Image (cartoon, rainbow, N blue to C red):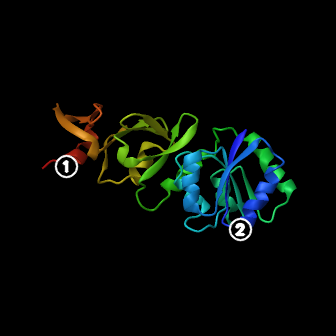
Amino acid sequence: MRKIIIIDDEAAGRQLIKEYLEDYPELILLGEANNGVDAVKMINEFKPDLVFLDIQMPGMTGFDVLTHLEELPQIIFSTAYDQYALKAFEVHAVDYLLKPYTKERFKVAVERLAENTQENKARPLAESLLMDQPKSPERILVQSQNKLVTIALENVIRIEAYGDYSKLVTEDKTYVSNYGISTLEEKLNSSAFIRVHRSSIINLNAVKELHKYSKSYDITMNNGDVVRVSRGYMDNIKKLVY
C-alpha cells in the first residue's frame, strides 16, 4: 500500500486523479489541497509515500513546496504547462503528467512507481532546490537513513568533511549532506559559519570556549565536541578575537 495526497488548485484536476485512482486499491488517498501552503502542511503532517503535485498554484509553486518539506515523498507532477518538464526530471519526479491526460497515460505513471525505490536516486537533486536559492538558505535537505529531511541550519553545531559529502552535527543527531564541505561553505551565512580546518566548519553561535594549543586553538562546542583549528585557517579565528 502507498499513501497518496493530491495537490492541485483546480477541483477538476483533483477529481480526475481520484477517479483514476479507483483502479488502484493499493493507493490510499489521505487527502487533497488546492494551494502550496496547505500542501506543505498536509504533506509534513501525513508523510505520504506519493504526491500528485500541480506546479502553478496560489501561494507557492510545486517546486517551492518541495523546499519546505520535512521528508520528500515520491512525486508525480500533474500540470497543464509543458515548460517545467525538464526541471521536474532534474529533481527526478517519478513522472510528468501533462493535462489533459488519459487513463492509459495515468497507468504508465503508476507503473513507474515500481521502478522507484524509497531511496529515490533522484532525491539528492531535490536538495539543490534549497541550495540554489540566491541567499544563504535557512534550511537544508539532508539524508536521514532512507529518507531526506529538512533541518534548520541554526541547529547545526559543526560540519565535517565526509569524503565527497559532508556530515552536519546537531545537538542530538548527525546528518549527511550530498554536498561537499567547500560547496556548503560558499552557501552558508559567513557571519555564523566559519571554516577552521579543511575538514571542519563551525557554527560560532554554538562555540563554548577556545583553548590555546601550541600555535593553534582547540574549539570546544556546546555539545562537547572539540574541533582543532589548523594553521591555514588561523586568520579566520584571529579576526574574531578582540
Is residue 66 something that shows in the picture?
Answer: no
Q: How many marks?
A: 2
Image coords of residue 3 (percent x, y): 68, 44
User: At x 51% / y 43%, what residue is drawn?
Assistant: 149
Mark 1 residue type: Leu
Sequence order check, earlier mark of 1 and 2: 2
The residue where tag 1 is placed is 240
Image coords of residue 71 (percent x, y): 55, 45
If the image is split into quadrants, where does the N terminus sit? top right
Of the two numbered discs 1 and 2 in the rendering, the one whose residue sits closer to the viewer: 2
Image coords of residue 160 (percent x, y): 39, 37
> In the displayed structure, does residue 217 sit left or right of residue 145?
left
User: At x 66% / y 66%, what residue is drawn?
Assistant: 9
Element type where label 1 sits in the image: loop
Q: Nearer the viewer, residue 29 or 151?
A: 29
Among the 4 quarters of the image, the one containing residue 226: top left
Among the 4 quarters of the image, the one containing residue 85: bottom right
Vertical arrangement, residue 133 with respect to residue 114, above or below: below
Q: Nearer the viewer, residue 181 or 32?
A: 32
Vertical arrangement, residue 114 with respect to residue 132, above or below: above
Element type where label 2 sits in the image: loop
Q: Which of 134 and 107 is in front in this view?
A: 107
> In the displayed structure, does residue 27 sit left or right of residue 45?
right
Image coords of residue 47 (percent x, y): 59, 44
User: At x 22% / y 45%, what residue is drawn?
Assistant: 237
The residue where tag 2 is placed is 81
Dot label at residue 117: none
> In the displayed structure, does residue 174 sit left or right of residue 21?
left
Local packing at callout 2 (Cα closer than 10 Å; few below 14, some 14-19, many 20+) is few
Among the 4 quarters of the image, the one containing residue 113: top right
* Distance CA(mark 1)–CA(mark 2): 51 Å
